[in-house]
Amino acid sequence: MSGLRAAAITDDSPSPVAGTSLWFRIIASILIIGHLWAVIGRPIEFATQGPFGTSPSAILFRNPVRAYSEFAYLDHGYAFFAPDPGPSHLIAATVTDPNGVMTELLYPDLGDQWPRLMYHRHFMLSEFLNNIYHPPGEPPLDIVNNPTAARDWRMARRRYEAVRDSIVACLQKQHPDCVIAIRRLQHRQPGLPEFFEEKIAIDDARLVTTLLDEIEPAEMSQTQEMMPRDGGTPPLGTMPLPSTVMPPVEIPRSPIPRSSSIEEIRPIRENAGPEPEVPAAASATEAN
Amino acid sequence: MIDLLAKAWDAWQRFWFAKENLLTVSVMRWPMVGMILYTHLIWTLDFEAFFADQASWQSREFIREYQSEQFAYSFWWYIPPQWMWTAHFVSLVILSLFWIGFAAPITGWLCFMIVVSYANRVPLAMYGLDQVNGIAALYLALSPCGGRLSVDAWIRRRLQNVNAASRVVGRTLGWVFKVPFWGVCQRTYDRPASSARLSMRLFQVHLCFIYLWGGLGKLQGETWWNGEAVWLAAASLDYQSNDLTWLAHFPWLYQSLSVATWVWEISFPILVWQPHLRPWVLMVGVMMHLGIGMFLGMWTFGLAMIFMYLAFVPPETYNSVWLQFVSVFRNIGPVAVES
């Protein structure tokens, strides 16, 4: 028995390099270095992202291995819970049947999506919708003067609308003959002073804010202030940092202008705030 | 100088290409491919909502436009709508075959293709779990992970124990099908191999990069410095699966946990290579991921990360655990090392 054990382990123990040719090892070494380059390329890009894009040096560094990293599904930033654990972003969908009865659905919802993995799938979907959000309307004056920035501005909005319309179309398929309207919600965590002094629990309705489909006035003026007249890169240190710290409690603002066809849609949730965001597809359905 | 370079080259070769027991990668195949299989099985519950061409959460047109400048591929682009369910079930069958180690040299690469194709079809619903699944699928496909603890190994033993005629049949099948049956019939198929070492090292080094960038990313945030990050994670209702708000009453605890997290992540790539520290470093990681699973509901991601730690366990440990397991439960004398 012990002999068998010893023999087995000795036979299987790591042995010196043998049985492979030198050329094989040289080529394999080059491939390994290229592979590891691809592994770190995307995290470096991710870490050097700013409000005006990724560092040109990081892009240059990754370019030779970009195709491989995308092909092999290695293009990840690995920034788990970084730079800060932020608020969650949810999607609230209002489903109105032909009789006018409204049902409110929430994505993600632990009660509806099971198992937990499926819940996380919906969670990522709602987070993505928020991540690519871009306000409607024409770009601000300073951006209009820069054709590239203006094109990017409009493309970003189209991209957001495409994702939003996909979500609405999926809900429409699940609820035929109903009018679907969705809106983005932000669910933040209570700060410690709120938790202790104001007794705001983590499920407190006051922590949920409806995100409006419009440009943030403060953000707009800040952006205009930061952007140089020629549309070039703003001076270092003047760029606003990504919003990572919990925002203060927001006071619901006046609703966004909407078409008369959705007048009767009202939010059901007590904390839902202003009117939902209704994409073109849903409006058209209702108009018909 | 030349001597130094020669030593470095020798160390490099030993690090990546020394022959390694297949047991480590073969053991890793079971939990990792099991997780991949589970991940894809769950899509079945809401398959059409995510994968249908039209009226799905992520429309085909949008995703193709979204990836138009990427080298991302997916076989889903070539599957007609009426064949989507079939393609899904065939994918699950292939993943199951790789899981049990049948024709692993082929099913391994098919598994990788499936993982990437699913991820690129619904990229908006992907998260850390899918990234780890992709890594696992790639490195297991590169490895001879079907050499042990597998149906391939079982077939090989059967063929070796029967008459010569069967071996001829096996070799003929091997000639026809090239890889899997060829592997089954090779006497050296389960012997230590450089590819096992290469795969194991890639797992180890990639894990180091993941933690390094995870830690460095946290340093860009304010709350990981001031210690509130763990509180913010604990107070996120949408992640929470068990109440952690009691942490608010112990500022020293959540603050030290916040700092310890990124300190541990950044130091992982250095400390894990120290043999005497390795078990402790990995134990901290296991506790962290189990904690995230228990309190933030991300069991699948946490377990997938822990499974990567198996690459740091030497094959001798698996051997001795297996021998003890067999001895205890069978209470017999000599046992074969081969599973």
Image (cartoon, coloured by chain):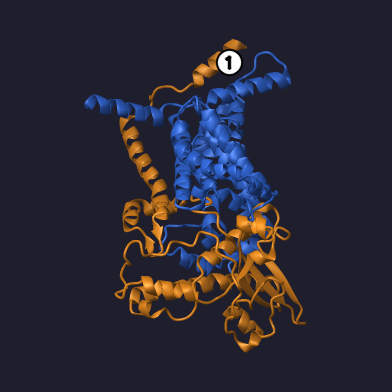
Chain colours: A orange, B blue
| Residue A72 vs residue A114, the one in the foreground | A114
The reply to whether residue A20 is visible in this rendering is no
A221 is higher (above) or lower (below) than B81:
below
Question: In x, y percent, where is residue A199?
Answer: 69, 59
Q: Chain of mark 1?
A: A
- Residue pointed to by mark 1: A5
Q: Please state, as top left, top right, bottom left or bottom right, where the C terminus of chain A lies in the image.
A: bottom right
B154 is higher (above) or lower (below) than B32:
above
| Residue B130 vs residue B40, the one in the foreground | B130
Question: In x, y percent, where is residue B95?
Answer: 60, 45
User: Across the whole image, how many numbered discs are drawn on residues?
Assistant: 1
In the rendered image, the residue lying farthest to the left is B1
| Residue B331 vs residue B159, the one in the foreground | B331
In the rendered image, the residue lying farthest to the bottom is A260
Question: In x, y percent, where is residue B278?
Answer: 51, 29
A79 is higher (above) or lower (below) than B60:
above
Q: Residue A4 occupies which quadrant of the picture? A: top right
Question: In x, y percent, where is residue A57?
Answer: 31, 55
Q: Amino acid at mark 1?
A: Arg
Q: Please state, as top left, top right, bottom left or bottom right, where the N terminus of chain A lies in the image.
A: top right
Q: Residue A280 occupies which quadrant of the picture? A: bottom right
- Mark 1 is surrounded, within 10 Å at the Cα level, by few (under 14), some (14 to 19) or many (20 or more) other residues, namely some
| Residue A242 vs residue A138, the one in the foreground | A242
The reply to whether residue A32 is visible in this rendering is yes
In the image: residue B43, left or right of residue A227: right
Write the residue at 50% across / 17% down.
A10
Write the residue at 60% across / 11% down.
A2
Write the residue at 52% across / 47% down.
B134
In the image: residue A150, left or right of residue A79: left
Q: Secondary structure at mark 1?
A: helix
